[in-house]
Image: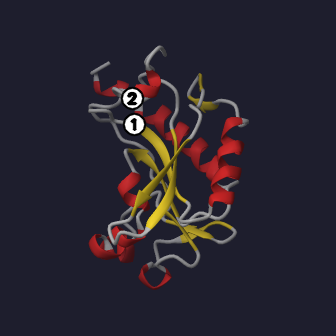
Amino acid sequence: MAIAFELAVNFGSNETAARAAHDLVIYSGHLAAGRRRIGLHKPLLNHNRRTDNVPYLEMSVIPVGVGWGVALDDGHEPVRLTAAELTELGRGLYQLLARFTGYQAAQVGWDPEWRVDPAELRQEWTDELATGTLPGLVLAEDVLSEMRGSGFVLFAPGFYWIPYAGEHSSTLTRDDGTS
């Protein structure tokens, strides 16, 4: 099973915004992670369905070599990062996200795709939305606005988030002794 550290973005039906973000990622270069510079794979654009069966366009931005068993990484040297390095890489992905427009929800982390489905957030995560315990979740101003608690603050014009708390040592990080 693959585990990817990535930026997942739900563009709803806004293909124009998704294509613009896709192009921005392609020309963005490398991101810092400690003393390393990490490249990004060409973003993946996929047609998905929310838990309420509404279709949406999802983009995944995956750093090269950082995940575990990620098919895109075949032929690339694996890169094992500390929690601090992953946090810096995550912040770089959020800086990239701040330049996107037209999306509904986004999140950086290990396999964050489930967190960009507004229907699932509404059904399963209302308490966490109200208490602000989904750090790094970014929502468009008009998405789930009635469910957002005081933990949400301005991320970029038209978008609010629960500020990113960074990554922690785990079996997926180099500082856990599993490199």
Which part of the image, by quadrant, shows the N terminus? Answer: top left
Sequence order check, earlier mark of 1 and 2: 1
The residue carrying mark 2 is 70
| Quadrant hosting residue 16 | bottom right
Helix, strand or loop at label 1? It is loop
Residue at image point 32% right, 18% down = 179
Please tell me whether residue 43 is drawn above or below residue 101 in the rendered image: above
57 relative position to 97: left or right? left
Q: Amino acid at mark 1?
A: Ala
Residue at image point 35% right, 57% down = 114
| Image label count | 2
Helix, strand or loop at label 2? It is loop
The residue carrying mark 1 is 4
Residue 132, horizontal then vertical, whole percent: 40, 69
Residue at image point 47% right, 14% down = 75
Mark 1, Cα crowd under 10 Å, few <14 / some 14-19 / many 20+, is many
Residue 161, horizontal then vertical, whole percent: 52, 65
Please tell me whether residue 105 is drawn above or below residue 112 in the rendered image: below
Toward the viewer: 110 or 70? 70
Quick check: marks 1 and 2 in contact, CB under 8 Å? yes
Residue 127, horizontal then vertical, whole percent: 30, 75
Q: Could you give the CA–CA distance between mark 1 and mark 2, rounded to whole angstroms?
A: 6 Å
Mark 2, Cα crowd under 10 Å, few <14 / some 14-19 / many 20+, is some
Q: Amino acid at mark 2?
A: Val
